[in-house]
Image (cartoon, helix red, strand yellow):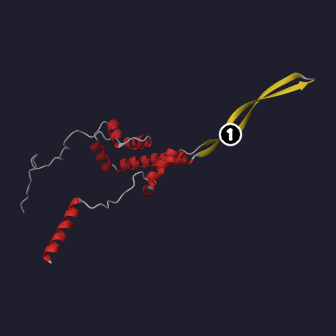
Amino acid sequence: MKKIDKDISKDTIKEPKKKAGRPSKWKEEYIDLVYKLCLLGLRDSDLAKLFDVSEQTLDTWKKQHPLFFESIKNGRVIADGEVVVSFRQRANGYRWTEQQAIKCRDIEYKDGKRIAERERVEIVDIERFVPPDPTCGIFWLKNRQPKYWRDKVAVENTVPSVDDTLNQIADGLIARDVK
């Protein structure tokens, strides 16, 4: 049996292809950072500017890095939820109780003369109230129940168009001539 030696040359070994284009600016720490930025209300265009990339690159990162995309979604859901709660409170009005320090004086009198004076601080509960904001209520209802609260009322056009009128006249004349 004859032994076959294969000459392995540089031509027969395939080297891995190099990626075309500029190296990616992607960093793993963007996952946590983007969550915090979305809590602040930043949009995709704002994020792209901060990361010094195009919006298209940001979209590519969302596809290539699922955790990055989840961080964006989670940050926005929480931020939007906080705004909804605040907006709803503002539309309905709300109350809260807060504590406030009040300075009190105790004065002792004897035979009509002041003999002692002491100061003390008491902590008292004070109830605060913000009345409903009609603008917020209207905005909420227009968006949540547009059928009942929109400004523009849909009116059905009952006047026939000129073409419809001419067609009806033509149909009448044809029908008369046929008889």
Placement of 92 over or under 154, stated as above or below: above
Q: Residue 161 in the image: x percent, y percent?
A: 24, 60
Q: Compared to 1, does 123 lie above or below?
A: above
Position in image of residue 108 (x %, y %): 87, 26
Task: State the residue in front, 103 or 40.
Answer: 103
Expressed as whole percent of the image width and height from the top left, the position of residue 77 reads 44, 49
Outermost residue toward the right in this view: 111
Disc 1 residue crowd, few under 14, some 14–19, many 20+, Cα 10 Å: few
Q: Which quadrant, please, contains the C terminus?
A: bottom left
For the point 27% across and 62% down, the residue is: 160
Callout 1 amino acid: Ile
On the question of residue 53 being in view, the answer is yes
Q: Is residue 86 visible?
A: no
> Quick one: which residue is furthest to the left in this view?
2
Q: Name the side, left or right, on which 121 lies relative to 76.
A: right
Q: Quadrant of the N terminus?
A: bottom left
Q: How many discs appear? A: 1
Residue hosting label 1: 126
> Along the line of sight, which residue is nearer the eye, 132 or 9?
132
> Which residue is found at the position 28% from the left and 47% from the top?
60
Q: Nearer the viewer, residue 169 or 99?
A: 169
Nearest the camera: 64 or 47? Answer: 47
Instruction: Provide the secondary structure element on which disc 1 rests.
Output: strand
At a point 82% along the width and 24% down the height, the residue shown is 117
Q: Return the x and y of residue 79 as percentages of the image width and height.
A: 46, 45
6 lies left or right of 145: left
